[in-house]
């Protein structure tokens, strides 16, 4: 009584996805297996050390260290993403009816967005990101 | 009358609605009965007036007092503040009661003695319980079960609350001096907190407008009784007595709770204002002699109520807790175990008197139970030596009188006797308490004599004397005489139950004897005293811990030869102003209430045994309440050739005076010492010993009930230990075992977790897939086979179908 | 005018109008920005403004939410307001609880050296993340679109990863944070995958559109298998947020690794977000299936059924064996998720719009979220209030069961908070937990899920063992003084005690005034069936004919 219907093309349109998935899995598996099979293996001795150069590791690896580089990267991201968001907005905004409510909403929205990036900027400033000492 | 008819019609509307809901065929009778009896009698129990909201002060002032006393206990206040709070709150409640009484009865003029002039009102405090439980209730439908925290005030309620709050105020004042010995401990505030809580519970019991609130109060007074009997909780006998009282009462409460539930099952409501109009229907059947048409359930309910009433009011076979309850402080004995709480059973019967009339068995049970209890307790009381216990047995006996009065269709007599008894029995107890207080806990009548002649004991003696006269039923000048006479007269006038009249008459003689036995031995005669056990504890301060319980037990086997001489330095401690004022007030009040319960000759004018019901105050109070229904089969027997009441009056005058005379001869004439009197010369052998041992009823109960239960409990204990506990332990270990298994998955390693999460998701998705695919086909295939082609297509493509 | 715009822009315009419904979140966001900057000030009084400001922001957001009654465009339109007010309310208690979690030793260093090392300071970040996370929670409650839902969920979760890692100075916290982050990413991937499938199966991201499309598919014969797969994956993926089997593994490790105050936070905020999300996702399919027309579609129901049973059983059974109070509470958190899933399965009841409190499973879940939040925060607050200096000089909070032994005698207030909280969690009648659990039972019974109710009851009985053990330890056991450990002292942060007391009072008081709350949850748990819920005539004739109330006219 219950009719089971396969939507037209519902699966077939996913064939590229499946293909990609298969390729990804195959590629990963192939590399792992191949390196196991083909690569030569010489275990033990210096091979097991942290640094194969022969230098003995000092202290523990579980240690906190300065994250300033990450901070710089984050500041970059803040501005990078701002640009990414600004582009589509900038291309669309001229199409809006000037002075309409819609345009005002759009303007307000991007100003709000930019204000948040300004806050991020202030945060970075206070955190000392721009002090390269 | 216009104002009055409107609420009645509303009640009838509600009534018809309730009947439509309840769906019992019996309710059809009720509807029919209610419709043809509509204008005249359909108003039974109906709300006919209103009362101002300050009526709520009656229950809630004592509750406030309880809270404040509790605060005092927490703040460790060690002065008489709790007593002050209590007396103030209770006096306020009394004033409110008087106000409510004026509104209820006085508003209609009070004159004319008309039976149905007092109004009935419901004062609502708040919505308490309101349930829907039928399917798909519409929001506007009336709830299926309603019990509001509201109070039903009619004349019967007023009658009860007047003496409850009035006596509680006086006894609270008395206790402020009596309990002063406990001022240094937390006990004083604790005592008063429980005292106030008791009055609140009693108010709920008497004033509640539904059975559930009555039940709440019923349990509340039981709790307070337990707390106060066990007030000296360091004394094993007090703890045992408290436990005994509680357990005995539970048996009775079982009956009451069953009755409550059956009432709901049968009538679909527990609210008086809706319940009594339905009872009216059955009552009409009963009055027309159609007893067989009343469903058995209606007839069973009052029997169950009776069980509850007999437990609370200490009647056969549940009376044994009351004498032991004398372990509590004397003010408690006076208020709870003599004047008020024990009359709750009488109230229950009186309140549901119409329902009792609908039952063939309930009233005879009440009558015979009451009469036999009266006789039994009086015989025990004759042989006891502890004066407080004598008073306790006399209470049991007098309660028996009240039940017998109700049972022989004399609701007025029963209720009047409750009223008068409350006054004189409280007075007797308080007098005994004063003696006990002054003589360091001495209660043995063989060790005290001539108290009347000692300095400072005049008022106590006077009060005791007045109380004894009342209890003995001294003719004409005592209220007790008139109320007791009413009961005996009703019994004599009842054709089928004249035997009860004879029993009560005989008991009245015994009562006069044992009452004056106490008076002549303790208050009259040569001056002699031996202090009680508490003398060593405190030389001359007022503190004492009331250790009378233990030696009261020992005294039963005491033969009088071991007369320990009074300590040289002991001086009796005469009562102070608080005790004296209270006793004096009560003594005066006991005379003032005579006109309230006395027909003053109007009865004779009617020439009818029940004619006086419309004549005097207590009759009005009872007659205009739900108890004021005309009983069926009003055939009146003659007694001694006169109307039953006249005959009973002369007969009871004779037996009363005879009893006093016997006591005078045996216990006063020629008595030289406290211990020995002429009565000791009379040897009755086994009968006397058995009476001293309370007819071995406690031992009988122990053998018949406690022992088998104990054996059974050992068997159950073994079963419980071996099998039940074993099973439970097994069940307890199962989850732990499962835990140990599942625990291995919590390795703490992140990639294990990730693997398990992914695996879990895969498993679930697969499980669902396999679970649903065949199931979906199967289910739908059963219902109506789909075309074969479709099915095969489904399987081939493995497509999941979901039933909408 | 709008007709001139392309269709994507039309959608964007509706987004703009939607922004109006987000005033609470916007307010909270602005507060966050302020807090984030103020926390970096060199002046200690200014830095100390962070937590009070967060509280002000929450109060403001809560008031705005309560005033706006923002109905969203989704099958559960009224949940947003309840969710936002709930988030603000419990958030306020959490502000009290989280005081002093970070920067404690740092501040004493600052006092000693007089030098404020801005890089080492974590206060600003911590409180900003706290508010971000609550903003995410509010957004989740008000989400009406899969994309918004995903972003909101991640906004809720991402800050918590960091907060866990910095909640104590121990390596354990770092480990917990990392575990939480990676496993959380796995979970997020899972439900994002599910969202993608839902989009693939229906062609929409708006919840109401999806609901309409699913209805169309049902009318056409059956739910599309991609949609179904997407729903299942989404539900299972969100199970990470609510700590349900099979995504529960991280829970005890993370709770134990973070500070007690943070664990209390984790027990409520992500769980609430997860339940809002699950209810929203599930409501796309709707409770209009089965013979009674009030069940979930078979597969979805089975998934939730299996998850619920496994979750409550695993949580309770494992809690029996623990000796760490935090782990016990973590497993109890798992178990409670299982209980709440029962309400999701039961659904809004026969009357599709959810009429009565005792029959509306969604209302039961929403009520339970509140009661669970109050009770569990109380229990964690007790742990957060007790501390000792361990050998290495670090602050260590109470965790082992021996630490709370005899607490009612040594620290009476804390002891009683613990007793009230765990007895409430157990669900004993006078307390809030009972009134939370009761509608779960009744709604499941009225939905006909009797086996589930039986399992729920058995699990409640198992849970009694460890809850009563905690109460017993506090109340009856004598205090234990171990020679190896320094004695526990009360924490200097009085507001944590306030949080505990607020919770304990809530457990008692909310039970008394629960009627009003129940009404609020019934309103919040209102489910709008898709337009055209009326079944086709031939089907209605086959099955039990639906009674008129169940047929909702299209609107």
Image: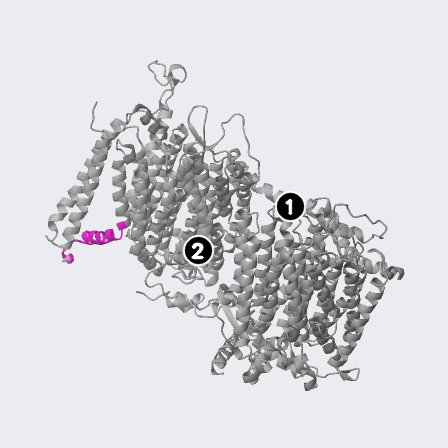
Q: Nearer the viewer, mark 1 or mark 2?
A: 2
Label 1 secondary element: helix
For residue B460, the mark is none
- Furthest toward the top, the residue is A54
Q: What is the chain letter for disc 1? A: B
Name the residue rendered at 60%, 44% in the picture.
B731
Q: Residues within 10 Å of mark 1 (few under 14, many from 20)?
A: few
Bounds of the magenta segment: C2-23
Q: How crowded is mark 2: few (under 14 residues within 10 Å), some or many (20 or more)?
A: few
Location of residue A112 in the rendering, given as x and y in whole percent from the top left corner: 19, 45
Residue denoted by label 2: C513
Magenta-colored segment: predominant secondary structure: helix
Label 2 secondary element: loop
Viewer-proximal residue, C29 or C179?
C29
- Furthest toward the front, the residue is B455
Viewer-proximal residue, B97 or C86?
B97
For residue B727, the mark is 1
Location of residue A41 in the rendering, given as x and y in whole percent from the top left corner: 38, 19
Answer left or right for C471 relative to B767.
Answer: right
């Amino acid at each position: 009584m219950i009719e089971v219907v396969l939507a037209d093309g519902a699966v077939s349109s996913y064939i590229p996805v499946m293909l990609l998935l298969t390729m990804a899995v195959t590629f990963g598996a192939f590399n792992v297996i191949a390196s196991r099979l083909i690569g030569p293996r010489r275990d033990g001795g210096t091979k097991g050390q942290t640094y194969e150069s022969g230098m003995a590791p000092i202290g523990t690896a579980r240690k906190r260290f300065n994250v300033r580089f990450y901070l710089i990267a984050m500041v970059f991201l803040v501005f990078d993403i701002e640009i990414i968001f600004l582009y589509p907005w900038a291309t669309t905004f001229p199409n809006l009816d000037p002075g309409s409510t819609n345009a005002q909403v759009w303007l307000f929205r991007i100003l709000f967005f930019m204000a948040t990036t300004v806050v991020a900027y202030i945060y970075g400033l206070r955190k000392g990101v721009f002090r390269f000492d | 009358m216009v104002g009055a008819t409107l609420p009645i019609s509303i009640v009838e509307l509600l009534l018809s609605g309730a009947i439509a809901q309840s769906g019992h065929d019996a309710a059809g009778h009720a509807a029919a009965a209610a419709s043809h009896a509509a204008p005249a009698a359909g108003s039974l129990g109906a709300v006919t007036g209103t009362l101002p909201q300050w009526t709520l002060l009656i229950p809630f002032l004592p509750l406030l007092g309880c809270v404040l006393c509790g605060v005092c206990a927490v703040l460790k206040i060690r002065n008489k503040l709790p007593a002050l709070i209590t007396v103030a709150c209770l006096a306020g409640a009394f004033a409110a009661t008087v106000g409510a009484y004026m509104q209820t009865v006085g508003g209609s003029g009070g004159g004319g003695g008309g039976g149905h002039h007092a109004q009935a009102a419901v004062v609502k405090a708040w919505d308490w319980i309101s349930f829907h439980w039928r399917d798909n209730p519409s929001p506007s439908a009336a709830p299926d079960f309603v019990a509001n925290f509201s109070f039903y005030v009619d004349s019967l309620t007023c009658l009860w609350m007047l003496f409850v709050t009035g006596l509680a105020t006086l006894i609270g004042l008395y206790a402020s001096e009596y309990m002063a010995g406990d001022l240094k401990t937390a006990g004083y505030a604790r005592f008063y907190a429980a005292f106030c809580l008791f009055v609140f519970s009693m108010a709920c019991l008497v004033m509640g407008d539904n059975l559930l609130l009555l039940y709440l109060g019923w349990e509340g007074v039981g709790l307070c009784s337990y707390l106060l009997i066990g007030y000296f909780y360091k004394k094993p006998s007090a703890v045992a007595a408290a436990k005994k009282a509680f357990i005995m009462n539970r048996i009775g409460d079982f009956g009451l709770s069953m009755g409550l539930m059956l009432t709901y099952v049968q009538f679909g409501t527990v609210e008086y204002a809706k319940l009594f109009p339905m009872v009216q229907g059955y009552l009409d059947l009963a009055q027309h002699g159609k007893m067989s048409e009343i469903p058995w359930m209606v007839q069973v309910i009052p029997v169950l109520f009776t069980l509850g009433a007999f437990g609370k009011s200490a009647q056969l076979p549940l009376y044994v807790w009351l004498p032991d309850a004398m372990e509590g402080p004397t003010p408690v004995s006076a208020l709870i175990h003599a004047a008020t709480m024990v009359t709750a059973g009488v109230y229950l019967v009186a309140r549901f008197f119409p329902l009792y009339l609908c039952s063939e068995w309930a009233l005879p049970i009440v009558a015979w139970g009451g009469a036999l209890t009266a006789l039994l307790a009086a015989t025990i009381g004759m042989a006891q030596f502890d004066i407080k216990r004598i008073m306790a047995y006399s209470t049991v006996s007098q309660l028996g009188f009240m039940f017998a009065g109700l049972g022989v269709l004399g609701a007025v007599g029963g209720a009047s006797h409750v009223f008068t008894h409350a006054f004189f029995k409280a007075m007797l107890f308080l007098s005994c308490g004063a003696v006990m207080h002054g003589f360091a806990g001495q209660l043995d009548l063989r060790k005290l004599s001539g108290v009347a002649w000692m300095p400072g004991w005049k008022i106590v003696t006077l009060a005791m004397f007045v109380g004894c006269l009342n209890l003995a039923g001294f003719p004409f000048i005592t209220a007790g005489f008139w109320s007791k006479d009413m009961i005996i007269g009703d019994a004599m006038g009842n054709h089928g139950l004249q035997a009860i009249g004879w029993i009560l008459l005989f008991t009245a003689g015994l009562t006069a004897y044992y009452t004056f036995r106490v008076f002549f031995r303790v208050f009259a005669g040569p001056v002699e005293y031996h202090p009680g056990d508490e003398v060593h504890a405190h030389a001359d301060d007022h503190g004492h811990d009331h250790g009378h319980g233990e030696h009261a037990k020992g005294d039963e086997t005491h033969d009088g030869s071991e007369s320990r001489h009074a300590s040289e330095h002991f001086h009796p401690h005469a009562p102070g102003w608080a005790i004296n004022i209270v006793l004096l007030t009560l003594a005066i009040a006991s005379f003032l209430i005579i006109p309230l319960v006395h027909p003053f000759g109007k009865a004779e004018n009617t020439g009818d045994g029940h004619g006086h019901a419309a004549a005097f105050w207590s009759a009005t109070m009872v007659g205009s309440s739900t108890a004021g229904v005309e009983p069926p089969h009003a055939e009146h027997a003659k007694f001694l050739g006169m109307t039953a009441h006249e005959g009973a009056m002369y007969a009871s005058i004779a037996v009363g005076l005879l009893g006093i005379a016997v006591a005078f001869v045996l216990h006063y004439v020629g008595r030289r010492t406290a211990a020995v009197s002429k009565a000791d010369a009379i040897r009755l052998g086994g009968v006397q010993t058995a009476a001293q041992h309370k007819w071995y009823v406690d031992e009988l109960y122990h053998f018949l009930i406690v022992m088998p239960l104990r054996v059974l409990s050992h068997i159950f204990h073994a079963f419980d230990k071996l099998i039940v506990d074993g099973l439970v332990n097994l069940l307890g270990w199962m989850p732990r075992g499962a835990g140990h298994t599942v625990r291995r998955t919590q390795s703490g390693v992140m990639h294990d977790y990730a693997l398990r999460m992914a695996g879990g998701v895969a498993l679930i998705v697969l499980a669902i897939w396999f679970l649903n695919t065949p199931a979906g086909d199967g289910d739908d295939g059963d219902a109506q086979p789909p075309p074969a082609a479709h099915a095969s297509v489904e399987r081939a493509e493995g497509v999941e179908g979901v039933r909408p | 005018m709008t007709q001139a715009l392309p269709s994507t822009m039309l959608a964007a315009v509706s987004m703009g109008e939607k922004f109006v419904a987000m005033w609470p979140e916007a307010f909270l966001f602005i507060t966050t920005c302020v807090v984030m900057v103020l926390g970096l000030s060199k002046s200690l009084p200014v830095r100390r403004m962070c937590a009070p400001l967060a509280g002000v922001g929450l109060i403001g957001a809560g008031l705005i939410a309560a005033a706006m009654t923002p109905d969203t465009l989704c099958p559960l339109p009224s949940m947003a307001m309840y969710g936002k007010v709930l988030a603000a309310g419990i958030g306020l208690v959490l502000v009290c609880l989280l005081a002093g979690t970070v920067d404690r030793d740092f501040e004493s260093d600052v006092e000693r050296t007089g030098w404020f090392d801005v890089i080492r300071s974590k206060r600003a970040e911590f409180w900003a993340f706290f508010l971000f996370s609550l903003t995410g929670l509010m957004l989740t409650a008000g989400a009406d679109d899969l994309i918004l839902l995903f972003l909101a969920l991640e906004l809720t979760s991402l800050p918590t990863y960091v907060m866990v890692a910095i909640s104590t100075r121990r390596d354990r916290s770092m480990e917990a944070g990392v575990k939480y982050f990676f496993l959380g990413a796995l979970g997020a991937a899972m439900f994002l995958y599910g969202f993608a499938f839902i989009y693939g199966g229906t062609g929409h991201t708006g919840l109401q559109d999806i609901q309409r499309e699913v209805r169309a598919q049902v009318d056409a014969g059956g739910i599309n298998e991609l949609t179904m797969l997407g729903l299942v994956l989404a539900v299972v993926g969100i199970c990470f947020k609510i700590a349900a089997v099979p995504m529960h593994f991280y829970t005890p490790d993370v709770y134990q690794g973070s500070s007690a105050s943070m664990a209390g936070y984790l027990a409520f905020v992500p769980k609430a977000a997860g339940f809002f999300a699950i209810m929203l996702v599930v409501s796309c399919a709707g409770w209009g299936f089965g013979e009674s027309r009030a069940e979930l579609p078979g597969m979805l129901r089975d998934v939730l059924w299996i998850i619920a049973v496994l979750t409550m059983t695993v949580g309770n059974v494992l809690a029996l064996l623990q000796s760490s109070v935090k782990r016990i509470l973590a497993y109890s958190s798992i178990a409670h998720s299982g209980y709440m899933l029962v309400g999701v399965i039961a659904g809004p009841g026969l009357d599709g719009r959810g009429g009565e409190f005792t029959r509306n499973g969604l209302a039961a879940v929403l009520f339970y979220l509140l009661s669970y939040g109050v009770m569990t925060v109380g229990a964690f607050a007790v742990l957060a209030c007790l501390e000792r200096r361990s050998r290495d000089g670090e602050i260590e909070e109470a965790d082992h069961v021996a630490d709370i032994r005899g607490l009612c005698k040594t620290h009476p207030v804390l002891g009683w908070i613990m007793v009230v909280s765990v007895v409430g969690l157990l669900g004993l009648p006078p307390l809030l937990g009972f009134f939370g659990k009761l509608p779960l039972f009744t709604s499941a019974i009225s939905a006909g899920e009797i086996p589930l109710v039986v399992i729920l009851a058995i699990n409640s009985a198992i849970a009694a063992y460890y809850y009563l053990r905690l109460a017993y330890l506090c109340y009856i056991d004598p205090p234990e003084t171990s020679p190896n450990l320094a004695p526990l002292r009360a924490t200097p942060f009085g507001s944590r005690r306030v949080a505990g007391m607020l919770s304990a009072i809530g457990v008692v008081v909310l039970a008394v005034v629960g009627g009003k709350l129940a009404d609020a949850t019934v309103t919040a748990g209102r489910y709008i069936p898709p337009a055209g819920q009326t079944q086709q005539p031939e089907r209605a004739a086959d099955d039990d004919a639906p009674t008129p109330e169940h047929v909702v006219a299209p609107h």
